[in-house]
Image: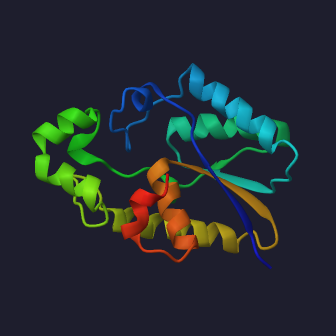
Amino acid sequence: MDTRIILIRHGETAWNREKLFRGMHDVPLNDQGRRQAQAAAIALAGLTIHAAYTSPLLRAVETAAIILQPHGIAALPHEGLKDINYGEWTGHAEGEVAERWPKEFADWCSRPEQARIPGGEALSEVSARACRAMAELAAGHSGQTIALFAHRVVNKLLILSALGLGMERFPLII
């Protein structure tokens, strides 16, 4: 039997709002992020969710707790759902990254599947990690619906994999 997977991105953080590279840095939700999670909780309240897993980063954990509250379940942390490691870019705004690492940032913007973030991960590494996690979790819940709480980059890569599309399509997933 197939497993139904609901991919959910965490709510907004101050770093999202300021367009700072977050990655593995543990940033909590802001008030808007909590409101977004509450709206998602209402939208998903009618679904049966059998199990849930979350990135161990606080923004995903908080989002999961809010959304899952009406379901009476808690999400279990899974390292495979962690965000991309932005290495030296972490905590810096896009404009600053473009100035300090012009070639690497240009690669990230034009062909992210080939980009290498200084001190960070390549998309292929994140994809391999996240896809292994999704396959493992889906196999453990045959015929059930599970929710995965993760991050923009991780969710985009999981969608590409599920659709059988290459990572060169990464910029096309919004």
- At 53% from the left and 23% from the top, the residue drawn is 30
Do we see residue 152 in this rendering? yes
- At 12% from the left and 53% from the top, the residue drawn is 103
- At 73% from the left and 32% from the top, the residue drawn is 39
Quadrant of the rendered structure where residue 40 is? top right
Q: Nearer the viewer, residue 54 or 7?
A: 7
Quadrant of the rendered structure where residue 78 is? bottom right
165 lies above or below 20: below
**Residue 111 image offset from top left, x and y in percent:** 27, 62
In the shown orientation, is residue 3 left or right of residue 116? right
* Color encoding of the figure: rainbow
Do we see residue 72 in this rendering? no
Quadrant of the rendered structure where residue 89 is? top left
Q: Quadrant of the N terminus?
A: bottom right
**Residue 38 image offset from top left, x and y in percent:** 72, 30
In the rendered picture of this protein, how many numbered marks are placed on residues?
Answer: 0
**Residue 4 image offset from top left, x and y in percent:** 75, 66
**Residue 124 image offset from top left, x and y in percent:** 35, 68
